[in-house]
Amino acid sequence: MTILYFLKNVDIFKGLNDVQLTQIQQGCREKEYHSGNRLFAEGETADRIWIVMNGQVDLRFDLPGRPTSEENTIFSITATSTLGWSSFVPPYQYKLSAYCATRTCKILQIDKEFLFNLFKKDFRMGFLIISNLAGVASTHFHQLQNSATGPPSSAITITVHMATCGIATGAREVMTALMEEIYSSGRQDIRVKSSGCIGKCPTEPNVTVEIGGEEPVVYQKMTPEKICQVFQKHIIKGKVQEDYKLI
Amino acid sequence: MITLDFLENVEVFKELDDNQLAEVQKYCRETEFSRGDKIFGAGEAPRYLWVVMDGQVALQWELPGRSALPETTITTLSEKMTFGWSSLVPPYKYRLSAYCSTRTCKVMQIEKDALINLFEQDAEIGYKVMIKLLSVVGSRFLNLQDEVAKRRGSDIMNQW
């Protein structure tokens, strides 16, 4: 996979043309992390953005004086998602800590100053990237709201499989629709996670629903409309939606 | 009438020059609320970006179907501060509710569709406003994080 092809699918580069992406490519550098490695810590100077190329990164709200723990994960991100919007927001410090949550994860880093120099010459590029970053910050805001309204161990877990294959077929839109449904329902016992591919690419976007000790149900080819139906009928009323089940 | 003198000091318009401010000015309107009035509610689809002109506005974190409690106020805003950032950021739904928290408050409302069109036509204005708006989102995130830390802290205490 060339970096240019990858950059086209990155959340914050939505709307950019090939010339703009080629300019950005010149400021990218790849880094690899191993399970448990910390990418950055809350409070550290934020001077770059981080884009997940593969693997999974957990964003945690580490409590002062306590060791980091998976329980404090606010959300997880996978390929083509970006971290580090705080690099563009005074006082330029990371708001959460980030950890590699898979055996390895590969990350693209781009320095803020490099991007600022591009923005000064191309306001359109700056407008699109900053608008997209605001969208990322908005999602994180919503996820923080959701994480705080649920008890530490939720009875219901919904996992949206968001590897590149899932995102290409609309997993991000499915996630957004799901978050809105949960928010509107006022339910506080539901945990939403994102994770990688489950090896069923032709049926993406796939979503796994786990309720209490019941057998997990995997739904296939989800759309924003279908996930709303699954939410209302399966999560709320307990009736598995057989038509959408992955067999 | 909203003056350029006022607009140039609004946090999200600080980078704009007079010509750019005059473009924004076309879509601004003043309105007034009384203590306790709800300016907008969490979950609603936004029509405006808002700026406090006089008095104070409280941003509250509410769950659907529950009434707001005073302790759910995550921040209080005063003159020249912007709120309703989600009017310009997908999926375009207010994340918090806004209430007038002084005897009266005067606020400026700016049509979000007009602003989005303006940004499309003039990317320089769009860039200069959105980078400041991102800072507004960042500061609300910190306000929310403080509230979450308080709640988590009390959860830990309750588990003892």
Image (spheres, helix red, strand yellow):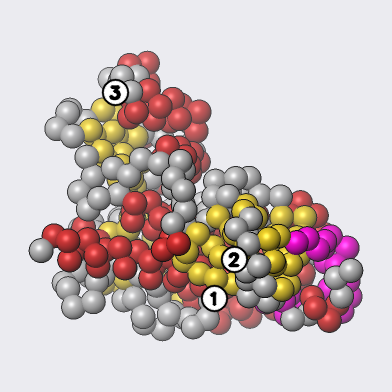
Reading the image, the residue beneath label 3 is A238
Which region shows up in magenta?
Answer: B10-32
Q: Which residue is mark 2?
A: B101
- Asked if marks 2 and 3 fall on the same chain, the answer is no
- In magenta stretch: residue B30: yes
Chain under numbered label 1? A
Residue drawn at (63%, 62%), measured in percent from left and top?
A: B35
Considering every residue shown, the one lying at the far front of the view is B103
Mark in the foreground, 2 or 3: 2
Indicate the amino acid at tag 3: Gly
Mark 1 vs mark 3, foreground winner is 3
Residue B96 visible in the displayed image? yes
Where disc 3 sits, the SS reads loop
Image position of B3 (left or right of A61): right
Coordinates of residue B43 in the picture (x, y in percent): 54, 46
Q: Do the residues at pointers 1 and 3 share their chain? A: yes
Inspect the image, locate mark 1, and give the three-letter code of the amino acid beneath it.
Answer: Phe
Whole-number angstrom distance, CA of label 2 to CA of label 3: 42 Å
Residue pointed to by mark 1: A88
Look at the numbered disc 1 and give the secondary structure of its residue.
helix
Which tag, 1 or 3, sits closer to the chain's start? 1
| Residue A194 location (% of width, % of height) | 34, 47
Q: Are marks 2 and 1 on the same chain?
A: no
Residue A95 in which image quadrant: bottom left
Residue B9 is inside the magenta segment: no
Q: Residue A208, which numbered label?
A: none
User: In the image, residue A236 lies at what x, y percent?
Assistant: 34, 28
